[in-house]
Image (tube, rainbow, N blue to C red):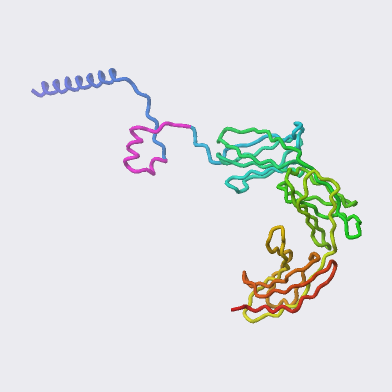
Amino acid sequence: MKKVRLAVGAVFVLVVCALVAYRLASTPQSEPRPPVAAASATGTATERALEHDHPPQRSAPPVTQHAAQLSGRVVDERARVVEGAALRIEVSGRERAAGSSDANGRFSFSGLPAGGVTLSAVTGRHRPHRREYELVAGQPLDVEIVLSTGRVLAGRVVDRAGRPIAGASVGTSDDSAFAVSSDDGGEFELLGLGEQPLTLFASKPGYAPRHERGVRPGARGVTLRLDPEAILSGLVEWAPNVEAATVSVCSFDSHFERELCTARVLLRPGQSEFRLAGIAEGRHDVVVEIGDREIARTRVLVRAGELVTVPTLRVEPRD
């Protein structure tokens, strides 16, 4: 009986092995399943189970936010290379990168954010350039900037006797925003200006600043006369518990139809004297303020080159 049971057991084992071999032979082989990334361990249990059954497809790593590139060349209207153009890139109104064009007019900025950027280029010899570009990550953009020559304004800076003033700073209200210095003959030349009338400024230490309004670009032979500066000085008396005060020299400007202050000094207790230079000839108000509150005002008549002493100013808050 024991031999019979052993024989039956052996037959059963052989049958089971045959069935297993048959199932393995009839089942198609599938590719090995890739291991689940270690980062998935941070997900929930359900997420990990889903990733195990349906592993995520592998794709290229995401492009970082700062992977865009903008390059190009700067030329003038005659396709001549412009070297030394000052270039600036802004994103949402804030500077992101700056540089200049090389000897071949080329420039390149990398590591920029994808999306809208504003590129500006100025030289002081051409009209300013400003344009928006849309950058795409991983797709370098190459552009050509063509700068127009613009208008020229030339003239001379002299003193009251008509003698040339060298080294005077001359600028305009034009958006080119570049200033030049007058040469030994007092002559200056401003380039890259627009078509609209502008205000011309000139200044130099020792002289009162001068401005001429309504000057048309393209004019030559403009004369700017600088008068010797006047100087205002005076004494200050401080009331207790006053931390600081501002003394300004102001006058009414008919062009802007409001009061403009051309000189200002901040004083603190212990400072008993003040001195304001660069004052132009004419009538001015000496204004004293504590914070944004005016507490005193004195009218003075100033002549070119004079040293004018202002009556003592009492710095005391008003109720």
Q: Image quadrant for the N terminus?
A: top left
- Relative to the observer, which residue lies in front, 69 or 281? 281
Q: How many marks?
A: 0
User: In this rendering, would 56 be left or right of 239?
Assistant: left
Q: Residue at x 69, y 58 (%)?
A: 256
**Residue 37: quarter of image:** top left
**Residue 112: quarter of image:** top right
> Which range is magenta?
39-59
Residue 275, x across and y down, in percent: 77, 71
Q: Is residue 8 magenta?
A: no
- Relative to the observer, which residue lies in front, 129 or 51? 129
User: In this rendering, would 61 be left or right of 176?
Assistant: left
Q: Is residue 50 magenta?
A: yes
Q: Image quadrant for the C terminus?
A: bottom right
Residue 281, x across and y down, in percent: 81, 65
Which residue is situated farthest in the left direction here?
A: 1
Would you say the magenta stretch is mainly helix, strand or loop?
A: helix
**Residue 318: quarter of image:** bottom right
Look at the picture and state if 295 lies above or below 210.
below
Q: Residue at x 82, y 51 (%)?
A: 181
Look at the picture and state if 39 lies above or below 301.
above
Look at the picture and state if 236 lies above or below 35.
below
Residue 94, x across and y down, in percent: 60, 48
